[in-house]
Amino acid sequence: MALKKSQKSLKKWTKQKLRTASGKKSSETGEVYAPSAKIKKLKSSPAGRKKLAAANKKKREATKKGKQHARHGLHKKKTTKRKKK
């Protein structure tokens, strides 16, 4: 039986290596978890480092307020351009 689109997405997501930028636990540092490839890409440029720092700041602020999730913008879904008919 073929997998549904949502099942394929979940299977792909579970194979990703999620980590923080420092490699330590988020509970110790207050950093966001992201896929290793994304962290590597962000750390390679000044603009990426700035974006990562902003995400970590939002995460720490949300944690201080007792929230479990923070809307920091690193996990936004990529959009694709639709073909015009």
Image: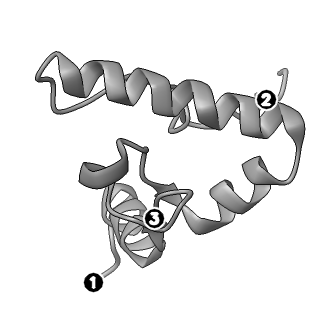
Residue furthest front in the image: 28
Q: Position of residue 69 (x, y in %)?
A: 24, 31
Secondary structure of the residue carrying numbered label 2: loop
Name above or below for residue 56 compared with residue 58: below
Which is more toward the observer, 7 or 22?
A: 22
Binning the other alpha carbons within 10 Å of mark 2 as few (below 14), some (14 to 19) or many (20 upward) gives few
Which is more toward the observer, 70 or 1?
A: 70
Distance Cα–Cα, label 1 vs label 2: 31 Å
In the image, which is nearer the foreground, mark 3 or mark 1? Answer: 3
Toward which corner of the image does residue 52 lie, by quadrant?
A: top right
Q: Position of residue 15 (x, y in %)?
A: 43, 78
Q: Position of residue 49 (x, y in %)?
A: 74, 39
Q: Residue 31: which disc?
A: none
**Which residue is at a point 47% across and 25% down the rendered structure image?**
57
Residue furthest left in the image: 66
- Mark 3 lies on residue: 19
Name above or below for residue 75 compared with residue 59: below
Q: Position of residue 30 (x, y in %)?
A: 35, 41
Q: Quadrant of the C terminus?
A: top right
**Which residue is at a point 58% across and 24% down the rendered structure image?**
54
- Mark 2 lies on residue: 81
